[in-house]
Image (spheres, rainbow, N blue to C red):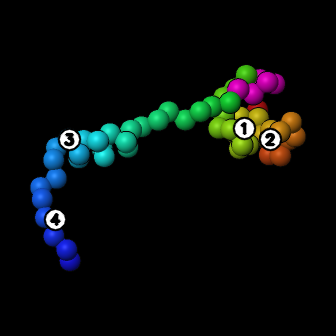
Amino acid sequence: MGQPKRKQSKQRSHKRRGAHQFIAPQLSVDPTDGSTFMPHRVNPTNGMYRGRQVLDTEV
């Protein structure tokens, strides 16, 4: 396996690691009940997806 020819600087390591930051997920608001859910997915609280009931949820 190849070996590095020069020592990698701290600045270069920090730049690389700085790109792997935590990003909070974007959430959509349901117009019917105001609950938040991940976009392009079924709303787990009421089972609706794009205005249609696709899951049976017990209230």
Which residue is rendered at x = 24% and y = 41% of the image? 14
Instruction: Kindly state the secondary structure of the residue where label 4 is placed.
Output: loop
**Residues at marks 1 and 4, CA–CA distance in whole angstroms:** 50 Å
Q: Where does label 2 land, which residue?
A: 49
**Residues at marks 1 and 2, CA–CA distance in whole angstroms:** 6 Å
Q: Amino acid at mark 3?
A: Gln
Occupied quadrant, residue 29: top right
Q: Quadrant of the C terminus?
A: top right
* Coordinates of residue 17 in the picture (x, y in percent): 30, 44
Please give the label number shown on residue 4: 4
Would you say the residues marked 4 and 2 are in contact, meaning their CB atoms lie under 8 Å apart? no
Q: Is residue 23 magenta?
A: no
Q: Name the one closer to the observer, 19 or 56.
A: 19
Please give the label number shown on residue 11: 3
**How crowded is the residue under tag 3: few (<14 C-alpha within 10 Å), some, or many (20+)?**
few
Please give the label number shown on residue 43: 1
Which residue is rendered at x = 86% and y = 41% of the image? 53
Above or below, 31 against 39 in this view is above
Q: Amino acid at mark 1?
A: Asn
Tell me which segment is drawn in magenta. 29-33
